[in-house]
Amino acid sequence: MLQRCEACGAFAYPAREACPSCLSPALAFADAPRLGTLLAETTARVPSDVYFRERAPWRIGLVKMDCGPTIVAHLHADCAEGAPVRMSLQLDKSGQAVAFARPEGETPNMADDRQWREMTADPKFRRVLVTNGRSVIGQEAVVALKAAGVKTVFVGVAEPWRPFAGEDQLRRQEGVEVVTLDAADEKSAADLAADIGGKVDILVNTTEYVRTGGLLDRKGTSIARDEIDQAYLGFINLAQAFGPAMRMRGADGINNSVAWVNILSVYALANWPAFGAYSASQAACLSLSHCLRAELRPGGIKVMNLFTGPVDTEWFQTVPPPKVAPRAIAQAIVSGLRGGLEEMYVGDVAEEIRQRLAANPKALERELDK
Amino acid sequence: MMKSQRTPYEGIVIAAPVTIPYVRYSIESAQWWIGRALGALVAQAGIKASDIDGLCVSSFTMGTDSGIGLTQHFGLCVRWLDTIPLGGASAIAGLRKAARAVQARDADIVACVAGDTNHVDSFRLTLENFSRFNQDAVYPYGAGGANASFALIARNYMRTFGVTREDVGRIAVAQRANALRNPHALMKAPLTLEQYLAARPISDPIHLFDCVMPCAGAEAFLVMREETAASLGLPAARLLSTIERHNAFADDPMQVRGGWAMDVGELYAMAGVKPDDLDVVQTYDDYPVITMMQFEDLGFCKKGEGAEFVRAHDLTIDGDFPHNTSGGQLSVGQAGAAGAYLGLVEGLRQVLGTAGPTQVSNARLGLASGFGMINYDRGLASGAAIFAGPSR
Amino acid sequence: MQSKNLLELAGAISSGAVRVVDLTFTLSPDFPVIVLPPEFGQAAPVRIQEISRYDGRGPAWYWNNVTFGEHTGTHFDAPIHWFTGKNLPNNAVDTMPAKDMIAPSCVIDCSAEAAQDPDFVLTVPIVETWEAKHGRIPARHWVLLRTDWSKKGWRDYSNLRDDGAHTPGPNPAVMKWLVEERGIIGFGTETIGTDAGQAGHFEPPYPAHHFLHGAGRYGLQCLCNLDQLPATGAVIVASPLKIQNGSGSPLRVIALVGSN
């Protein structure tokens, strides 16, 4: 994404208010060709900022983009002067989008680069807590994370006296530790944090509590209360139990604490009356996630929200396709962490809601009322 | 569009070059340093503060103050006022503006002054808040500051033209030799080429002795018409020519030349001199590689011959090409915006014959340059001035 | 009864001559609760949230906010809990007669049978066999079904399988008989529910609930320490919380046990 002049087509960087080629004010962010050439590099050994001083030596370079601008960028260790590089914008530990140059092609163990890992939240080598292993999404997340090279997956199970589908397989997996966690229970979350809170590098909040209905066709508040208990208060319990230690461990060596993942319904963004109360509980969680993001930022912990449409699980049985496969969500968790993203939209419905919300929120509200 | 002929600086002179000796750290404010410089100007010129009717100020660390606040602060009543935030180009830019002001008689005596303090965290704060492009697109990348930005320029320049660290080091070593004769230089230990080469890396290829030391200090001079100086009995240097340029060669992917290269012909034509005629040269030496670039861009050699030029010449006070005779910023220190003034003020002392221990014998014609504002990936501002002492 | 007899009882309790047996599980968030098919409303689990603990939220005191469903932990069922008892007078925990909160018990030990078969059901003949040994069950007595289920780990305790819970309980005939022929005041179990885990398939479904509450009688469940009670002669104290129009409540159940 770079600014591009709508009048003359020139790309501009750093961001500015008028085109340096024709002074047109019509500069819109557009996808820019990713390739460029590394003109020169340097290794900052005594940075003035304490963050970089801690991580020095730090390698940066100046990249001439094929599309025009020159960009100061963080460098992957395999980038060489004069050679082509592939650029991307990454969110750094402060949440700022920064340019990162990688070699044009794949190199061995490319994702293990020290500076690259500082920009991402790659689960490889790390320890991850998946909060709800009773759900299919939770179980798929465990499989995907293991495949991504996670060292240990702690997977929470509420009410361990209740058997559940997939339990045997979950317990059989190497490197998977089933732990007792009822996120909606303050004490349960605190007890588990006392046990493993110091070694959770990534927390994947797979809390799932879906019930149909909105306001008038429901009686009373007990279901709404459950929704809030599980999704919203559960989020708070998890945040209070695990957040402080994660924030403290943001710089704890190479496999430091890096990310918090929420799986949210895309209807957090726009209420879907058929699941109206559920949508509201998700909206509450979305709002809370922004608060969490701000509060985790001093520790450099990313908060990634993964938005999905209806998932192919029991509680969306009556909803016609397209639906999101739990496995697709699990894979998105991994790819989002690898990319160090703050937001992901999984599946066609989520992407459509995102686009339509941007285009015309009132029209979307009317459309969802069907 | 036709380019018009510039008006010559006929009868415009510069007098009373003043340096307030630098200190590494100061608990005083920038205003304190500027006030000291104004006091020294008045004392050296033998005038009253009320005789100053024009003021031109540059500083990074004045906080929320600008030139207008300083008038009340120092009890000055001026009819011409400017604040110049051009970093290393501030002295040349200030001189140009002041010269035209006194030439047009908008003012009679303009005090040009630059001063900065250096608290323990001043330098980092200046870096962090330098410019918007810098905040957006440079500081988040390792926060290497100017060192990292100039490292990229230096690396590209050195590779492109086959320049070695030894070549660049000759400039720093010669300036240290000069500095040992300047009692006010902060660097007091001799520097050999071996020591230069063995220094610790800061941001490759920039090593410790390629960097200036941030410090506190102030510099100043007066600009007036020749008859004013004569009526005051004040020795003064005549301003022969100037150039100034911003954002030159924007299409060069990386900076290998400054704006001087665009205007150098005019610089010498206006002064009516050739590069060979100069007795003393003061370049803007925030990094020695930038000085090498100026040797090329200011016409002492061709582009790409800078390394050969420094190998072929002795840059010390007694050498065949006396350069940065006070020791320059590399050895005296960089007192913020005063760093822009350091070369010009020293050059004025040289042509006035008042340089004392660093005096080049028979220095009559001098050149000083400025360079500054690495807003993003390159220094944007450049300027130069040629001036002559009374004996020429 | 004269006051001095009552004082004598208090003295015996104090001296230990009368044992007090606590039949109650600790009320905690991790104690299993009844699991209904998910499309039905669910009992809220027990939640204990700290208000303060000698800290900034209250420097000198410790206290909690507690929430739970009426039918969590060791709990009491009032007649209003079931449709069969919905129109009876004084059928809720706040209106039931206070005197019904204290009554003697008969404990039927079926722990051996339950150990063999989690779907063990209590029948009339089993009770008749018990009566042959201990005498006829008097009216207004609690009948407590001992299965030693309370000694199991919680997974086995709830014993959920794909088709629901498998835990022991009474069959329809014995419940009808105990209520109508013996006039018991209530029926108590160690399991989650006064009915068997599979009692939904009985006719009528959930016979303990059906017959007890339809006749204005009570239920007690999730009891423990029944093995410390004599077959007859213990006195049960079971006072539910006085919840307005409440269908039941967690409570502390104690038994007074004499020395013979």
Image: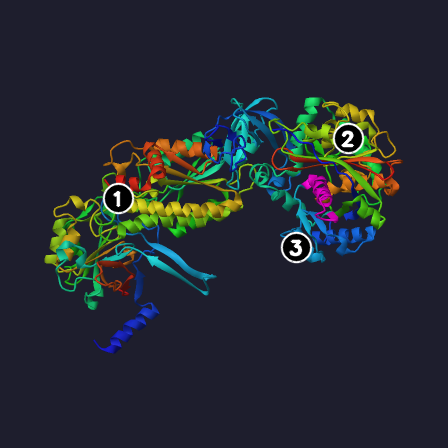
- Marker count (numbered): 3
Q: CA distance from mark 3 to mark 1?
A: 62 Å
The crowding category of the residue bearing disc 1, from other C-alpha atoms within 10 Å (few below 14, some 14 to 19, many at least 20), is some
Asked whether A130 or A102 is in front, the reply is A102
Horizontal side, residue B219 vs residue B235: left or right: left
Q: Give the magenta-colored segment's residue range.
A: B87-112
Residue B354 included in the magenta stretch of the image: no
Chain under callout 2: B
Horizontal side, residue B297 vs residue A335: left or right: right
Residue C204, placed above or below residue C134: above
Residue carrying label 2: B169
Asked whether A24 or B34 is in front, the reply is A24
Residue carrying label 1: A273
Residue A78: x and y in percent read: 58, 25
Residue at image position (28%, 75%) is C7
Residue carrying label 3: B69
Q: Main secondary structure of the magenta part?
A: helix
Do residues under tags 3 and 1 come within 8 Å of each other at their CB atoms?
A: no
Q: Nearer the viewer, mark 2 or mark 1?
A: 2
Picture disc at residue A71: none
Chain under callout 1: A
Residue at image position (61%, 24%) is A81
Q: Amino acid at mark 1?
A: Pro
Disc 1 secondary structure class: helix
